[in-house]
Amino acid sequence: MEDDIQIVEMRSLGRGRGFEVVSRESALDDPELTSTIAARLRVLLRLLDDEGTETRDVRGEKEEVASLRREENELEAQLANSDEENEELKALEASVENCLRLLNNHLGESFDNLEEAVEYLVENKG
């Protein structure tokens, strides 16, 4: 990526002999760092907006910034919904596990999943 930010770990080759690259990775792959950078950019843009400062770049990209902010808000809402759905799914999984445990206790069986228990009940309903 042309605008990538690289994190480079260097090791000394000894006094006066320079350095060598030990590892190199993209800083943009670190979600914590990129969210910090994004937050600081948002603060900077708000400061520029509040000051009424209009540079050539800012003036030309105000609509794009507004669009990105809307998109960011939509993504945050989707993430919140996703978190809620994950919690609901965990609750349902716990409920299924509880049902299976109760069925196993009641029937004196050791089914591995609820489908096996239901099949057993259907086959032996008489």
Image (cartoon, grey):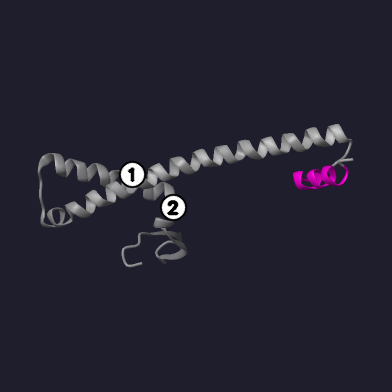
| Residue 49 vs residue 92, the one in the foreground | 92
Mark 2 Cα-neighbour bin, 10 Å: few <14, some 14–19, many ≥20:
few
Report the magenta residues as a range: 113-124
Give me the residue at 50% from left, 38% from top: 84
The residue tagged 2 is 30
| Residue 125 vs residue 43, the one in the foreground | 125
> Which of pointers 1 and 2 indicates the residue nearer the eye?
1
Q: How many marks?
A: 2
* Amino acid type at image mark 1: Asn
Q: For the N terminus, which image quadrant?
A: bottom left
**Main SS class of the magenta portion in the image:** helix
Which percent across, then down, holds residue 51?
A: 11, 40
Give me the residue at 10% from left, 50% from top: 54
Left or right: residue 17 compared with residue 38? right
Give me the residue at 77% from left, 45% from top: 113
Left or right: residue 33 compared with residue 107? left
